[in-house]
Amino acid sequence: MSFIPKEISNIDVLLLGKTGHGKSATGNSILGRTVFHSSPSTSSVTTEVQFEVRRYQETIIKVVDTPGVADTSSIEDDNERKELLMKEMKDAVILNPEGYHAFLVVYKYNTRFTKEEYDSVLQLKEIFGKNIVRDYCILTITQGDEFRRNYPGKTIQEWLKEQKDAFKDLLKECDFRAIMLDNMTDDENIKNSQIEDLIQMIRSLNNNGRRYTDHYFKEAEQIRERILRQEKMISPENLIEISLILEEVRLIIDSQENLEPSEEIVGRISYLKKMFQRSNAEESEKASMLVSKIETSILSLFKDMKNLEEENKTNKKSFDYESNQLYLRISAYNIQNSAYSELMEKINEKLGKLQKKEESFKRAIENERNKKLIEFEHKLIKRKSTLEKLIESQEGESDLKVEERDEPHKTKQIDQLSKEIAKIEYDIMHLDITLQKNYMDKMKSMISKEKDLRDKYKAKQKDVVEKREELERTITQDFVFKRVIDEGKALRLKEIELTEKLRAELLEHFVEYNNLKKSNTLKFSQNFKCTFL
């Protein structure tokens, strides 16, 4: 009996293939997590048959991984090779006496399909019957990423039809049922698509959904039922249920969404606790304690997360309030800053006008000085010209008789003009000095007034800059808002710590679960004495 709802279907598969072809990696891809340790080399990491389960949508998939069943090249004796293969198949029967929906024969793309591998398939037919390949085998080809690089645009079915020799014979026998897997991809869409294709292919097998089973499986099932009745071992279904619960909780943590236990999970845990408490099996107490630990871990986390959620709500309210206050302060800052900017523009405009006024005043005084100097220079030139003419006229009368000369009069005029010229030259010099002095006096007066204005404007400018800087400090050093943000960060760190704590506890629970699983399988194996010989 199980708590799993009726509508959930089961698919059980057995992985077969040579070491180094990606068998364990294929199992991990199907399970959606790393369970089986894989190696690209020819030395097998898997030393015993092992299994794990996952729930994909409404299907529970059980994957059984075997050591490399085709790795018999080092064994020369045919009977010894066959005996080794039968031992591994016996373990596969023990782990799943209900039988298998499909046998996945794993083959690495771009490698040669050897006679050794084909012989191992023939031996499987000897053990499980001649129709095992025809009705239940699916060829699972790994390294799909390399195939896509080598054959862009080509389908797997097109490539399969090009194959030859023993590999082609195997393909024909299993009706070209093959799936290409990329076990290295991180793309979730590709991962899910591969699983869905595999499930669809298994369900389309020509066996009407029946598991492969024979008298060995039936005998194993009878032995298991007897052992369960004698309460010597824990029900495998209940162990599987522990694994499913652990994995579902891990997925909830990874998603970081709805960190709250569903009624279904809580119900399944309660059901398991009751089942183990009623059982007298040797490992029931350990199983019961493990389930109780899982329950404590989950409920403790969800309780802490609930409290954390309330704290987050409070923090969000504070954050929203402080954000609004900050928005208002920033709006006020923008308005004030705009006013300061306008004031600064006016101050700069006045300073600019002041500078232009100074330059204009300077030009006006310079023009006035130049104008007066030009007037005096014109007078001087005119007087000098008249003087030169008088002197020439006087020199021209030197040949005249004395009575005809007007020498005294001209001499007087010359003296007069010379005095005027001297005076004009003096006036020019004095005017230049006077104008220079007046210019300097006016400039000093104006500069004094302008300096007062400039100092006044610069003081206002400095005041505006200081107020703007103070306003910016008020915004950037808002300690209340910073405290709220820091509280939010602390809560997020606390959330991470809680989930990491549960992850660590789940790993411990997985270890305990695996130990229980191995112990349970060992008890079954010790009671299962049949062989395929």
Image: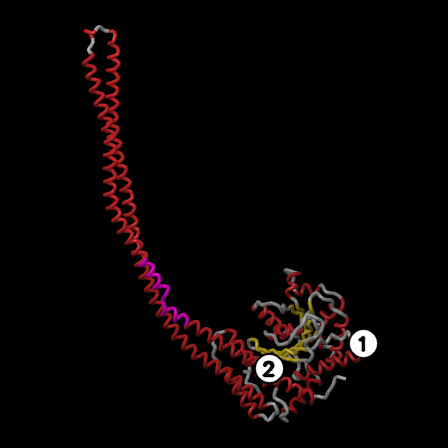
Q: Badge 2 is on which residue?
A: 511
Relative to 31, residue 404 above or below: above
State which quadrant residue 361 falls in: top left
Q: Is residue 175 visible?
A: no
**Horizontal relation, residue 191 to residue 91: left or right:** left
Label 2 packing within 10 angstroms: few (<14), some (14-19), many (20+) = few
Position of residue 382 measured from the top left corner of the image (x, y, whole percent): 24, 21
Q: Is residue 44 left or right of residue 414?
A: right
Q: Position of residue 116 (x, y in %)?
A: 76, 72
Magenta part, dominant SS: helix
What is the residue that sits farthest to the right in this orientation?
77
- Element under disc 1: loop
Residue ID at (70%, 65%) = 110
Q: What's the colour scheme?
A: secondary structure
Instruction: Inspect the magenta stretch and tell me whether residue 187 lies in it.
Output: no
Circle 2: residue type: Val
Q: Quadrant of residue 339?
A: bottom left
The quarter in which the N terminus is drawn is bottom right
Magenta span of residues: 466-486
User: Residue 114: horizontal and vertical position, in percent?
Assistant: 76, 69
